Amino acid sequence: MTQTPAFDKPKVELHVHLDGAIKPETILYYGRRRGITLPANTAEGLQNVIGMDKPLSLPGFLAKFEYYMPATVAIMRLKYNEGPGFKVDTKGNIA
């Protein structure tokens, strides 16, 4: 009897950090609603500021959070109020 290897099974996200998985469009939306000035006015521009395509030093990594964390506070509140309704895509983005 042959068994299907475990790696052929469908995958699910077991652990997603919301502050790193929120789409730039969502950050812009909540930033605007809360009157928060962000370092860009478009999703592409914000992604260029907060995105990382290579490893950074710890201070460099943490510096990115100061740009958008105020806007994500409202989103974090949603986690507790509407958490079960969130849908997460395969890249960890909240849909």
Image (cartoon, grey):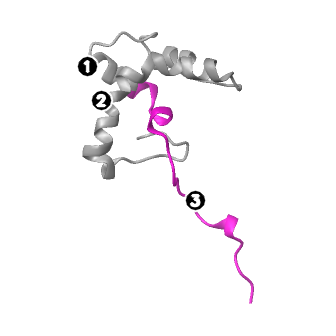
- Residue displayed at 54% across by 47% down: 90
| Lower sequence index among marks 2 and 3 | 3
Q: Left or right of 90: which side holds 25? A: left
Position of 88 relative to 70 (above/below): below
Residue name at image x 55 percent, y 17 percent? 63
**Label 2 packing within 10 angstroms: few (<14), some (14-19), many (20+):** some
Q: Residue at x 55, y 15 (%)?
A: 49
Q: CA distance from mark 1 to mark 3?
A: 35 Å
Q: Nearer the viewer, mark 1 or mark 2?
A: 2
At horizontal 54% and vertical 19% (from top left) the residue drawn is 64
Magenta segment range? 1-26
How far apart are labels 1 and 2 at the CA level? 10 Å
Which three-letter amino acid code belongs to the residue tagged 2? Answer: Ala
Q: What is the number of the mark on residue 74?
A: 2
- Residue at the front extreme? 59
| Residue bearing the label numbered 1 | 33
Q: Kindly identify the amino acid type of the residue bearing the numbered disc 1.
A: Arg
For the residue labelled by badge 1, is the local secondary structure a helix, a strand or a loop?
A: helix
